[in-house]
Image: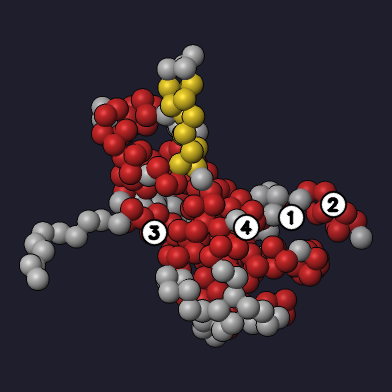
Amino acid sequence: MKKKFGRSPIKMIESPSLSQILFLIANGKNYAQKIAEIKGIKPSPVIRQLNKLKKFLNSKNEPLLNKTIYSIRWDKIAEEFYLFHFPEKCKRGTTALNLNEIENKKWFEDPMSFPSAEKMKDNLYLQNFLKAIFESIDDNKDDGFNIDTLKELFSAIPNIFISIILSADEKEEKILSDKKDKDINFKNFLYFMTQSYATSYKMPLQGAIKDGTLKFLLNLNIISNEDKEKDLKA
């Protein structure tokens, strides 16, 4: 067998240039010319990079504008996030680590089989959570949340999630607990994110999000505003 020489190809999630394109598209810079202007390069290399990312993108031709408009396929981002934290899909039915920091949250203790990649990629709570984090990157560049690659972001996201959960007061905890009992998709989301936290590298949180409270989750429509108002009046 011949030896292969040279550097191994950089994985997509480790590429600053490819990651930046996804972050830009998530923040509304969604066509090649605009992305090229921001990156300070010609459109042709941007188009090549967009082709490399086609698994994660929807594209739509706009003849009147003479543009191809791109949007993120959040199901594919959710699947990539799942496989980043559980590459061998071997954590089902087990607790990855002792979750000392959240063991007082009794609603995480229910035994359940670990949700599959197929379930989680279609989980709208996970998709909306990831979408909101992607969209926050531009807003937080000046606050010390300097993320260059998807790998860095995927490593940080579980810690952001847990910091929000731990900020919940008693009434907010009840909202979460009640919703978890009523909605299996929300329960899967909570359980999956908790286990992702257990296996993740704990990145610093300073400047991660401007509002590090449960409001961040509420504003994702993970818990609808209607549910929030109804439960807080109860």
Compute the Cα span from label 4 to label 2. 24 Å
The residue type indicated by label 1 comes to: Ile
Residue with the mark numbered 4: 123
What residue would you read off at disc 2?
229
Q: Do the residues labelled 3 and 4 touch (CB within 8 Å)?
A: no
Q: Report the Cα–Cα distance between label 4 and label 1.
A: 14 Å
Q: Which of marks 3 and 1 is nearer the N terminus?
A: 3
Badge 4 vs badge 2, beta-carbon distance below 8 Å: no
Q: What element carries label 3?
A: helix
Residue 6 is situated, as x and y percent measured from the top left of the image, at 10, 59
Residue 129 can be seen in this image: no
- Tag shown at residue 32: none
Mark 1 — residue? 223
**Residue 50, percent across and down?**
35, 38
- Residue 121 percent across, percent down from the top left: 56, 58
Q: Distance between the residues labelled 3 and 2?
A: 35 Å
Query: For numbered disc 2, what is the local secondary structure?
Result: helix
* Secondary structure state at the residue bearing disc 1: loop
Is residue 82 in view from this perspective? yes
Ranked by sequence position, the earlier of labels 3 and 4 is: 4
Between marks 4 and 2 in the image, the one whose residue lies nearer the viewer:
4
Q: Nearer the viewer, mark 3 or mark 4?
A: 4
